[in-house]
Image (spheres, grey):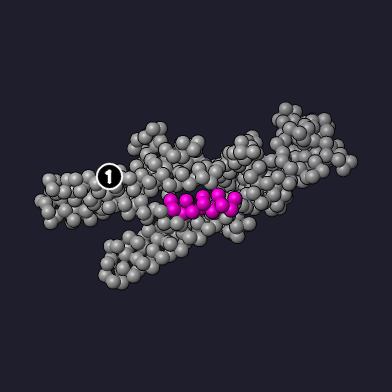
Amino acid sequence: MGEGWQVLKIGGIPLRLQPSWLFAVAIFTTLFQSRYAATTSETASWGLGFLTTLLLFSSVLLHELGHALMALREGVKVLSITLFHLGGIARVEKECPTAMGNLRIAAAGPIVSLLLAFGMLVGAAALSDTQPLATQLLSQVGLLNLMLGLFNLLPGLPLDGGLILKALVWQISGSQKKGVQVASASGRALSTLLIFAGLFFMLRGVLANGILLMLIGWFGLSANRSQTQMLQLQNVLRELKVEAAAGRRFRVLEADQTLRRLSQLRLTASEGEGPADWVLVCKSGRWVGWIDDQPLKLLPVQQWDQQRLEDHLRPLSELPSIVCSASLVEAVPAVETASQGRLLVMSAAGLPSGTLDRMDVGDAVLKRLGVSLPSAILEEARKRNGYPLGLAMLPQMVQTMQAQSSDQDASSSSNS
């Protein structure tokens, strides 16, 4: 789901609207209009239908604000609130590091919806004798809030009830991963049930309700699958080591070779290897440094045959490096902060053993996930030193993972 249009800020939190929200407004206005048509004029019925729709989405907004305000109370930054055709979502910078904090954030939304339902239904009862249209309006929106609150409490991801279930399992078992697994399985079961229920209603002739249930079920399965894939990707980043992802995009020259040899190396490329990224220099089997193209630029061509590489060496310590045993969670930020987006990989003995760039990281992750991309896409990513298609969010994901880990460590330290 894209960012959508930002329409305003509420307490510093951007409110965004997806284009699909406009379609939902039109559909709901039409549905609600038909319910008012029997008791009022056509013009008034359309106005009441539109007002009911606005009150419904305002309720959804308040539901998401409940999540957002509780997240802020738990120390979690809220990035935005987005309304779309099936409701709304509050995006946060990171997950709360504690199980009970997650439970409070998840429960806040349904509590707001149930309180709104209670207030509107009580107001409808109080006006029933004097304001029939207001009574109908409040009853309609109150019942919708009741349904919204109760539906979101169903125990399956991505619903709030699924987040509550995840937090409870996490709290009891001590394993966040176990909580996600249980809540995801429950979410898949609920979404599948909704799809079959929708199909049943469609076969019985209740077309609108059937389509709505199937749409909600399909959305639930998609969101659930996204949660599962995100968890798998995080596990891969933690488990994969640099040595499994590293390439060897450097060349090696002897220290007594001339600058002319360096020039030839830069002008030619070995078959299938592409141009050299770094040129490392060794002498008598020992690494002694590296060399860049600066001497070729500063010295006249006539001196290239007399000048030796050892006269222009630079220390290997100048190159950004990482040990081969580091995880990709450590490697991604290091790659991002390196000036060329590339690291020299050092063996356990402290010797150069390979290189690591964004393409190496992305390729290793995709292979571990069993995903194959066309060679043309991989080559394009290599040329621009970028992540392969679909993995551009890796730096942000790793940043979130590290922030969560730091928060959890801090929480553990304070508890102990």
The structure residue drawn at horizontal position 33% and vertical position 45%, both measured from the top left corner, is 115
Q: Nearer the viewer, residue 43 or 57?
A: 57
Q: Is residue 301 above or below residue 395?
A: above
Q: Please report the bounds of the magenta region as a residue range.
A: 160-174
Q: Is residue 76 left or right of residue 282?
A: left
Q: Is residue 389 left or right of residue 148?
A: right
Residue 95: percent from the left, percent from the top? Answer: 52, 44
Residue 91: percent from the left, percent from the top? Answer: 45, 43
Q: Is residue 307 visible?
A: no
Q: Quadrant of the C terminus?
A: top right
Element type where label 1 sits in the image? helix
User: Is residue 163 on the magenta stretch?
Assistant: yes
Q: Is residue 127 visible?
A: yes
- Majority secondary structure of the magenta segment? helix
Q: Nearer the viewer, residue 85 or 51?
A: 51
User: Is residue 388 on the magenta stretch?
Assistant: no
Quadrant of residue 409 in the image?
A: top right
The structure residue drawn at horizontal position 46% and vertical position 59%, both measured from the top left corner, is 187
The residue singled out by tag 1 in the image is 119
The structure residue drawn at horizontal position 48% and vertical position 47%, both measured from the top left corner, is 103
Q: Is residue 348 left or right of residue 361?
A: right
Q: Is residue 223 above or below residue 202?
A: above
Q: Nearer the viewer, residue 157 or 127?
A: 127
